[in-house]
Image (tube, grey):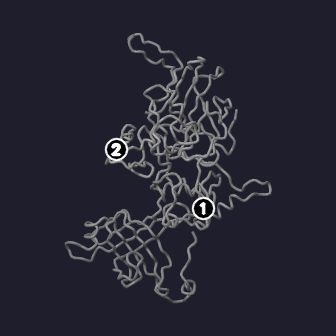
Amino acid sequence: MPRTMPAGTAAEFKKRNGLGLVTLLDLQLLDGTLYYWSDLAGSYTKKLGVAGAAVYSPWLLSAGPLRLSRSLATDAGDIRVQNISGDTLKRDLANAISSREFEGAFAVLRLWSLGLSAAVLEFDAFLTEPTFDESAGSFRVLQLLDPSSVEAPARVYSEQCTWRYKSPECGSTGSAAACPKDLASCKDATRAASERFNGVPTPPTVDIRQPWTFTDDNHDMPRLHPQTVINGMRR
Amino acid sequence: MKPFTKHLEGLKSELGLPVALAYGNVRARGNQVLKYEKVDTLSGDKKRIAINLLGEGEWDSCVRAWFNRVPVNVADTAVFHFHPGKDGTLGDGLVPISTGGDQKVDLFFSELPGGVDPVNYSRTAYVMVKAPPDIGAPGPDLDVLGDYKALKVRQFDNAGTQTAYAWSDNPAWWICDVLIRFFIKREGVVNEALSADEKARFDWQSFSDVATYNDATSAAASSAFRAAAWPSRKGRASRRCSSRCSSSRAATCSR
């Protein structure tokens, strides 16, 4: 997808001397907690939260390199964050990671040009693989559209229904709190969505190409001749 | 005998394996989940009733079909019922009344013995057939082979306004459909409208450009890019989508 650069970017980057790019990280945890981290402390226009500026704490040690691709290979990068501030018993980052869920947090990583007061690169991602030691922590940032974590096709033939109960595909508005996914339960008046049942409750197909034969040692139980072909569904 | 052309694929899926996603023109047998030999009480003929599940719906239509390589009239509702794989309609019940074209319970279920639960296989395209006696058949198998126009797909203009929901052999709209199914709207009824936020995930101009490019006709009046696809094995969506994207120059929005 073509990316439009801020006005004046070319002129700014042509200057023989200038200020380096500041890395800004806006972080929104699953519980709504917001963090603003940077590799240069200051007040910058924030991306997440109420519009306006925010004070970015200088916690970022490094960000990247980011691997960006035009294909659907997952764009990714690594960030390192300091784990020194705080006290000797509980450092700030360790305290935050142990008290809140960082896995899956929404992250917006920007390269901010001070000269332009604008971001020249923005990478929207989610956090994963949080690890930290005594002095630093690291995270991996993966692009929001992460096809490598999704299997396709998604649905398999099975005897039970595969829809999530009360999902749009299921359509049930019944009073039952849960669904065991079998046809009888689907027909039950507390669910009443049997028309949306997508399981395959039919008995397996059997082709008998040879007549039943009896074994020598057991005349009571017929046994299929070795050449009999059973052609049906895997159970 | 080599019945397949380069634009058609013939594959089979089974219980426990993925429900195939099929786009474009496909030649399919599907997954034969039921076969029952029924003796006609009047004529004494042995007719065979079979159900072949084809893939994830909604498919468009059946073009032609063969029973044990013998052509069959797919419009003959006494023999052949094609169900496109729509969502079942709540409140319809599971009464066998359908002769195809919808996702109600097939009429041939009424000819099966008790104990076989009539179902409509919601969202799964399938055929239910009642094959006449075939004394020339090589064995007890009933091979139901068909040419189908597979999945219907949403189509959009360069501003993201949906312009159609129809079968297409334009790969740009297949990619769009795959992205919608697996990433954008993972749950929803067939052809459920996208919200504004969901539409904002696409670069519609690029999809429109690719679709136009694929639709362009050469001097020989053949379209620039036409194909069929039937991924019936499990795999990572990134691989599925990347190959399709790179083959037709579509761009996706990763934000």
Quarter occupied by the C terminus of chain A: top left
Which residue is drawn at the image coordinates 64% and 28% (left, top)? B68
Which disc is residue B156 wearing?
1
What count of labels does the image hold?
2
**Circle 2 — which element?**
loop
Residue type for callout 2 = Thr
In this view, the mark in front (2 or 1)? 2
To which quarter of the image does residue A96 belong? Answer: bottom left
Instruction: Using residue A1 as the reference point, say whether residue A57 is left or right of it.
Output: left
Residue type for callout 1 = Phe
To which quarter of the image does residue B204 belong? Answer: bottom right
**Circle 1 — which element?**
strand
Which residue is drawn at the image coordinates 55% and 79% (left, top)? A5
Which disc is residue A233 wearing?
none
Residue A8 image offset from top left, x and y in percent: 56, 86
Quarter occupied by the N terminus of chain A: bottom right
Q: Name the residue under label 2.
A: A190
Q: Residue furthest left?
A: A89
Q: From what the image shows, is residue A5 above or below residue B244?
A: below
Towards the viewer: B142 or B255 = B142
- 10 Å neighbourhood of mark 2: few (<14), some, or many (≥20)? some
Q: From what the image shows, is residue A90 above or below residue A114?
A: above
